[in-house]
């Protein structure tokens, strides 16, 4: 297939330059066993055809990065647990992802434990929020120091008249919070 790509790159009648570049990139990605001189020869042929080689240079750069990290993932030859010589790219990637997965899992367990502890601190406290205390006081018509200065408006009273407070508790209410509130406060108000 390398010789076919080389013939395709040299043939001026078949395909566009973009198609030839794409074919070379696909070959490079699917044939990682190609030697560096073979790859460079194909790149030179593409460049002689006025093709853009920046994509191939980028792929080579990514491949060199992958190859730099590969030796740390594979045990040294002769070391206990060393595999047969010449591990495949899939084995290298699988080993890297496995190690990364282990590290993420260990870190995630610590974060989850810390998050659950924080959640227990929030949920275990049965202290009623300030908005719930105020709302309960207003709904039950029980004065507390916080609600003493709240204005009582009766929609049935004539304009400008001060209406006496009704001592029956209210059944429904609307709560508006200026500046917003938390989800926990919203849930406690709904309850």
Image: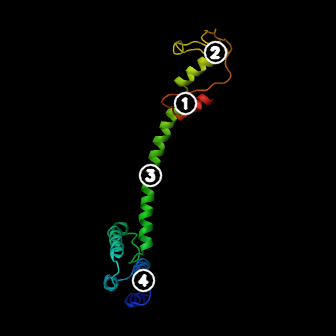
Return the residue at label 2.
154
Query: What residue is at 42 percent from the left and 83 percent from the top?
Result: 16
Q: Helix or strand or loop: what does disc 4 sit on?
A: loop
Q: Residue furthest front?
A: 159
Return the residue at label 4.
16
How far is mark 3 from mark 2, CA to CA? 60 Å
Q: Mark 3 or 4 closer to N-term?
A: 4
- The label shown at residue 158 is none
Between 157 and 132, the residue placed more toward the observer is 157
Return the residue at label 3.
106
Q: Helix or strand or loop: what does disc 3 sit on?
A: helix
Residue 79 sits in which quadrant?
bottom left
Which is in the foreground here, disc 1 or disc 2? 2
Which is in the foreground here, disc 1 or disc 3? 1
The crowd level at tag 3 (other Cα within 10 Å; few <14, some 14-19, many 20+) is few
Q: Is residue 110 left or right of residue 152?
A: left
Q: Mark 1 or 3 closer to N-term?
A: 3
Return the residue at label 1.
185
Quadrant where the N terminus is found in the figure: bottom left
How far is mark 3 from mark 4, CA to CA? 51 Å
Q: Mark 3 or 2 closer to N-term?
A: 3
Q: Are marks 1 and 2 in contact (CB under 8 Å)?
A: no
Which is in the foreground here, disc 4 or disc 1? 4
The crowd level at tag 4 (other Cα within 10 Å; few <14, some 14-19, many 20+) is few
Q: Is residue 188 left or right of residue 3?
A: right
How far is mark 4 from mark 1, CA to CA? 64 Å
Quadrant where the C terminus is found in the figure: top right
How far is mark 1 from mark 2, CA to CA? 27 Å
Q: Mark 2 or 4 closer to N-term?
A: 4
How far is mark 1 from mark 3, CA to CA? 33 Å
Q: Are marks 3 and 4 in contact (CB under 8 Å)?
A: no
Q: Mark 1 or 2 closer to N-term?
A: 2
């Amino acid at each position: 297939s390398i010789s076919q790509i080389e013939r395709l790159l040299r043939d001026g009648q078949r395909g566009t330059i973009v198609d030839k570049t794409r074919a070379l990139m696909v070959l490079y990605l699917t044939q990682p066993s190609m030697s560096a001189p073979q790859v460079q020869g194909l790149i030179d042929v593409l460049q002689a055809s006025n093709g853009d080689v920046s994509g191939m240079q980028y792929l080579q750069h990514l491949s060199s990065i992958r190859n730099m990290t590969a030796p740390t993932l594979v045990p040294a030859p002769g070391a206990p647990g060393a595999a047969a010589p010449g591990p495949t790219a899939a084995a290298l990637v699988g080993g890297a992802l496995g190690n990364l997965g282990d590290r993420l899992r260990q870190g995630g367990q610590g974060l989850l434990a810390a998050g659950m502890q924080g959640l227990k601190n929030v949920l275990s406290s049965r202290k009623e929020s300030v908005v719930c205390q105020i709302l309960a006081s207003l709904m039950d018509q029980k004065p507390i120091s916080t609600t003493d200065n709240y204005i009582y408006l009766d929609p049935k009273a004539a304009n400008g008249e001060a209406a006496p407070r009704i001592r029956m508790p209210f059944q429904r209410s609307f709560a508006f919070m200026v500046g917003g509130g938390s989800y926990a406060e919203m849930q406690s108000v709904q309850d």
